[in-house]
């Protein structure tokens, strides 16, 4: 089975072809980061315009690199949500036009289902499995007992982990996206500040990062007023240790609680060295297999959408040509 995937939910225009749900044939990603950098974040209008400009070229490149033709393609999978509505619409409309013109089945895919299925491009799933999704817009723990079924057992009540990284980076005057810069600084610094950890109610697998963010702001302000010198690298190290502590502790608890056979990680924050090391150590001790995909598959791409779409395809799920972008689509 060859599935064509299209992803335009945020700031990457991506098209990929995946074989049998687990093998990448081509995975083309056109990133817009450079265009958004000077604004310190993604500007929705600019994102939509870039997608319009890029989508045809990216599609052509994907086919060229694959040496396949439309005859080989079994279905078209596209991210229908969540994301920026104007950005999503470009991908959804391109997919609908192609499905109609080439007479191929159309499959709408949830963006987070895609992030989860990026892992299947690395390793076959073992159920039940637990997925930790840590990206710019999401922080979630998802339990899967079989293919295509998602049970969200925990999620952030305010900021996503990546969002917290980007906001703290901004306070330290680091460029956007700030996550990688904090990660680098954290490795040079020491944990000298005891930032809060939001454990929430006993047994809750939800997250909260806004209190931590406020605490970082206050700490920086208070130090300035008292004329104390705080090193950026120590702030970064202390902030990161709080984030990593909460993420890994809750993931371990959830994994044990639900007796999972595999833990998978997805989203841009999965690139974080502190998080990776801590997860690797903790799950090695517990003897629970852990999968963390390479960075290229952790951030937005269309191979993950094609991989998730392959499961829907085999389960007989189809979308009509009335498929619409849904910026607040629920994962289920
Ligand atoms: P979503 O999937 O929720 O819609 P998104 O697709 O925009 O969000 P990603 O592209 O998966 O999110 O991830 C981007 C985020 O990952 C940014 O917030 C960025 O700062 C963060 N990030 C990237 N590398 C690192 C790192 N090494 N450490 C911490 N955060 C990082
Ligand atoms: Fe994403
Ligand atoms: Mg992104």
Image: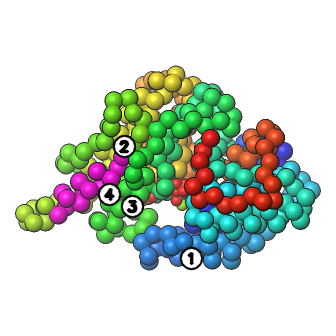
* Front in this rendered view, residue 295 or 256: 256
Mark 2, other Cα within 10 Å: few <14 / some 14–19 / many ≥20: many
Residue ID for mark 4: 185
* Front in this rendered view, residue 5 or 109: 109
Q: Nearer the viewer's eye, disc 1 or disc 3?
A: 1
Residue ID for mark 2: 244
Q: Earlier in the sequence, mark 4 or mark 3?
A: 3
> Distance between the Cα atoms at labels 2 and 4?
15 Å
Q: Residue at x 33, y 29 (%)?
A: 202
Residue 176 in the image: state x and y as whole percent.
42, 67
Ligand 1 is within 8 Å of the C-beta of the residue at disc 3: yes
> Distance between the Cα atoms at labels 3 and 2?
15 Å
Residue ID for mark 3: 166
Q: Residue furthest left?
A: 226
Horizontal arrangement in the rendering, residue 229 relative to residue 44 (left or right): left
225 lies above or below 78:
below
First to last magenta residue range: 208-221
> Distance between the Cα atoms at labels 1 and 4?
30 Å
Asked if marks 1 and 4 touch (Cβ < 8 Å), the reply is no
Q: Residue at x 33, y 53 (%)?
A: 210
> Distance between the Cα atoms at labels 4 and 3?
14 Å
């Amino acid at each position: 089975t060859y599935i064509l995937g299209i992803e335009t939910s945020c700031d990457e225009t991506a098209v990929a072809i995946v074989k049998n749900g687990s093998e990448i044939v081509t995975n083309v990603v056109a990133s817009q980061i450079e265009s958004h950098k000077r604004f310190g974040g993604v500007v929705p209008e600019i994102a939509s315009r870039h997608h319009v400009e890029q989508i045809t070229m990216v599609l052509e490149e994907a086919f060229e690199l694959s040496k396949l033709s439309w005859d080989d393609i079994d279905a078209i999978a596209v991210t229908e949500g969540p994301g920026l509505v104007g950005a999503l619409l470009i991908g959804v409309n391109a997919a609908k036009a192609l499905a109609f013109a080439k007479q191929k089945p159309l499959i709408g895919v949830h963006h987070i289902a895609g992030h989860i299925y990026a892992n299947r491009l690395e390793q076959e799933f073992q159920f039940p499995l637990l997925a930790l999704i840590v990206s710019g817009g999401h922080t979630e723990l998802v339990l899967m007992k079989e293919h295509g079924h998602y049970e969200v057992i925990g999620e952030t009540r305010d900021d996503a982990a990546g969002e917290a990284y980007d906001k703290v980076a901004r306070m330290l005057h680091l460029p956007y996206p700030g996550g990688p810069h904090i990660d680098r600084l954290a490795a040079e610094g020491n944990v000298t500040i005891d930032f809060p950890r939001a454990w929430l109610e006993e047994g809750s697998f939800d997250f909260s990062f806004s209190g931590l963010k406020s605490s970082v702001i206050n700490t920086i302000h208070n130090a300035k007023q008292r004329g104390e010198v705080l090193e950026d690298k120590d702030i970064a190290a202390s902030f990161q240790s709080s984030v990593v502590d909460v993420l890994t502790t809750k993931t371990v608890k959830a994994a044990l609680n639900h007796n999972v056979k595999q833990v998978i990680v997805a989203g841009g924050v999965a690139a974080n060295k502190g998080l990776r090391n801590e997860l690797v150590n903790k799950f090695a001790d517990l003897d629970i297999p852990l999968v963390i995909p390479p960075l290229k598959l952790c951030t937005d791409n269309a191979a993950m959408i094609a991989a998730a779409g392959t499961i829907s395809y085999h389960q007989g799920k189809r979308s009509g040509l009335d498929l619409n972008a849904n910026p607040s689509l629920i994962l289920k």
